[in-house]
Amino acid sequence: MTDTNTLYIEMRHNAVDHLETAILHGFTYATAGAPLLIADGLKGHNSRDVEIPGKHFTAVKIAQGIIDADSMVVLSRVKGHVLTGMGGAIKNLSMGCSSRAGKHMMHASVTPEVVPEKCTGDSHCIRHCPADCITLEERIAVIDAERCIGCGECVVACPHEAIKIDWSGDTQAVQEKMAEFALGAVQDKREKCCYINFVMDVTPHCDCHGWSDSFIVPDVGIVASTDPVAVDQASVDLINKQAGLVNSKLKDNFSPGEDKFCGVYPHLDHTIQLQHAEEIGLGSSHYELIEI
């Protein structure tokens, strides 16, 4: 069993706290019969650049443990998302298989900025900067925007949260970047991966929140495929066939056949990630549904 450290500072942002959180939730060798590995290392720095034919990236930062794996079974719960409209296998591959710096690459759109009052001048960011674009001036870190490559290593290296993250990038770019990271995650093992989507407990928000919400549709079941684009497309189609649940975050598109995620986030087009994933060769949105 594996996961990668989160970009935000909570109980899964380093391997020690991450393992403790997993154990508290029952993910142990004794209960699952498999060991748990945090794929990007103790502090989320263990990754390698994987070359891809992308629109936004020519290389993406994938966790070393993911690269070393010979094959993968990717388990995802399909749900809504405040930034991408929907999250399934593609989002799980991208965010779940990238290092913390990789997660920053997907979310951020501008050069990181130092918060002077939080900076201690301990040089953690300087030691981890691959572009050598950070210096100390009067014991405060300063980033040279012209030399910065936007990798995000300084953000994840700083233990004081003294380097800000910009979460304001437009949703189209974020979704396209997700698709490109997903491609990098399976680039060396595309014929040795399978994808299982749980289309159950479909909440309007992402699992990264510390709370949940009412489900927007009844449970559908479990969808499986060897194609991450097909499994997400089928999941969305099955969700849209359901009648939306009242007294949920769903405000529109209650009727069967109407887009439920657009009913929660009318300003977001969640199909962008599927379209771009297909364009770059991650998979196909065409599928045959076989019920078991």
Image (spheres, helix red, strand yellow):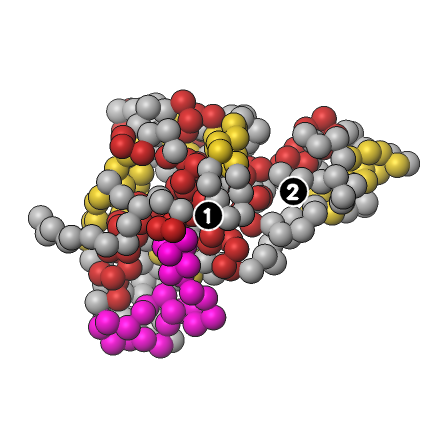
Which portion, as a residue range, is magenta? 252-276
Q: Is residue 17 visible?
A: no
Q: Is residue 36 above or below residue 214?
A: above
Three-letter residue code for mark 1:
Met
Q: Give x and y (percent) for residue 141.
A: 80, 38
Q: Is residue 77 left or right of residue 208?
A: left
Q: Please give the name of the residue rendered at 58% of the width and 37% of the height, measured from the top-left corner.
A: 101
Give the labeled residue for mark 1: 178
Residue 130 quadrant: top right
Q: Secondary structure at mark 2?
A: loop
Give the camera-side residue of 194 and 6.
194
Q: For the N terminus, which image quadrant?
A: top left
In the image, farthest residue toward the left:
292
How packed mark 2 is, by other alpha carbons closer than 10 Å (few <14, some 14-19, many 20 or more), is some
Q: Amino acid at mark 2?
A: Gly
Q: Nearer the viewer, residue 44 or 234?
A: 234
- Give x and y (percent) for residue 34: 30, 24
User: x, y percentage for residue 270?
Assistant: 40, 61
The residue located at (79%, 41%) in the rendering is: 144
In what element is the residue under mark 1? helix
As drawn, the label of residue 225 is none
Q: Nearer the viewer, residue 86 or 8?
A: 86
Q: What x and y, as percent, mark residue 181?
A: 46, 41
Task: Name the residue rendered at 58%, 44% in the picture.
Answer: 104
Which residue is under mark 2? Answer: 150
Numbered disc total:
2
As for residue 261 lying within the magenta part, the answer is yes
